[in-house]
Structure formats: C-alpha cells, structure tokens
Amino acid sequence: MNLLRIALLLPVLALCACNATIGERMGESLAVVRGFQSSDHAIPPEVFASAKGVAILRETNAALIVGGSGGEGIFLKKVGLEWSAPIAINTAGASFGLQAGGQQRDIMIFLNTDAEVSNFLDDGVYAVAEAAAVAGPAKTDPHNAGGPVPASYYYIRAKGLFGGLLVGGVYFTVDNKANRETYGQDASVGAILSDKLPKPQGATILTQALE
C-alpha cells in the first residue's frame, strides 16, 4: 500500500472511531471552552458575541511520516442573540511531511458571517486550511481592533508531543447518525439549528459558557 492510500485511509479509520453521543460531546465541548477561557490567552467576549456559528472539536493526531487525525465535537448556530441546540460533527484529516509523535488538539472555529455558516450547512462539509486560516485575537493582543473581520477565526490548544512540520488543516462533517439518535429520525440539521426541536439535557450549561 503506497503512502497516498495510507494517507486516505487514516482519516477514514479515525472517523470510524467517532461514536460519542451528543451528551458526551457536550461534556467534552464544555471542557474545551473552559480550558480556553482559563488559559493565559482567553478568547475575548467580542469573538463569542459577533460569531454566527461555532464548532468545538477535540482531535487527536498520530503520525510517522504520514499523518492522520480524527476527532468529534459539536456545532452551534446563533439564533437571534442566543445559541441553538448543538449538532454532532466529526473531524478528520491527513498530511505528509517529516513528523513523528502524537498530539491532542482542542479546536474552536468561529464562523463570523451568515455566508460562512451557509457554506457549512449547504455542503455538510467545512474545511479550514492551516495556511489560510486566521488565528483569533487574544485578550492581550494589542492589534485586536480595526480592519475587516475575517470570515472565520480558529483557536487551537495542543497537548502532547509532536515533532516536525505538519502540513494540512482541519475539516469537519455532520454526524447524521448521532443527530438522529438524539433528535429523532426525521430531524433535519436545519430544524435543529433553528431551535425548532427541544434542546438536549445539559445544552443550557454549554450555551451559557459561550455567552
């Protein structure tokens, strides 16, 4: 099996391991948000307030020359001034380069425009290239204000050891199976994110953490 096939197989295997319920994902996501907010570079309140959508992910990388990553999380949309019920999403990726080791990453991606949210919802797939993504401003960043707001911000917290150059990004897809298990077989992504269905238990605690 050549390197290209290995690279394509790794994300598939990673996605197969994503089977957490939305309740479990919300617990993980709450830990991710609190981890960011208790760090030295907490995400500014303005980023939460102006966002139209947010993806919260916990991802694991493993690599030896060819890298693969996989994880799971949730996505929420702003409905008026409040956050919607969450939908389940999975993330996976592959990369080439000189790399060895393993690493856990907590990722938050803020979509700042309605068009960017629509891109994700229309396709069911959303991709962020590390080379093109815009790191979100920190509280201590003196260049926080001014200029146009990017279509998206990303924040990453890494744990573990990883050596070498990682070339790639992150993309995520809707986990329809997990969503149906929580909201019912006929529940659509649009209905969930429009708050037309009851929120799962524990969602209020998470959405309060995002405010």
Image: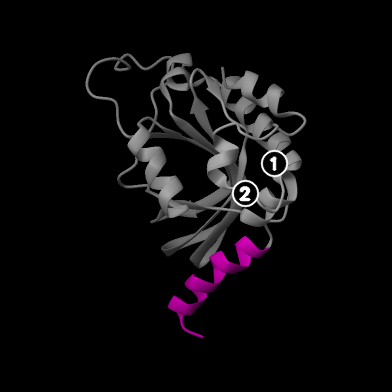
Can residue 75 be seen by looking at this rendering?
A: no
Please tell me which residue is depicted at 58% across the width and 56% down the height of the picture: 70
Above-or-below relation of 187 to 207? below
Q: Contact, CB < 8 Å: mark 2 with mark 1?
A: yes
Above-or-below relation of 130 to 194? below
Q: Earlier in the sequence, mark 2 or mark 1?
A: 1
Q: Main secondary structure of the magenta part?
A: helix
Residue 15 among those drawn in magenta: yes
Residue occupying the far left of the picture:
147
Q: Which residues are magenta?
A: 1-16
Locate residue 171 relative to residue 143 in the image: left or right.
Answer: right
Locate residue 186 relative to residue 82 in the image: left or right.
Answer: right
Residue 86 among those drawn in magenta: no
Residue situated in front as seen by the camera: 129 or 207:
207
Please tell me which residue is depicted at 69% across the width and 41% down the height of the picture: 25
User: Which quadrant of the figure has residue 35?
Assistant: top right
Near mark 1 (Cα within 10 A), the count class, few <14, some 14-19 or many ≥20, is many
Q: Residue 93: image x %, image y %?
A: 49, 59
Residue at mark 2 = 72
Looking at the rendered structure, the secondary structure element under dot 2 is: strand
Above-or-below relation of 51 to 160? above
Q: What amino acid is at disc 2?
A: Glu
Q: Residue 140: image x %, image y %?
A: 41, 14
Residue situated in front as seen by the camera: 59 or 204:
204
Tag on residue 25? 1
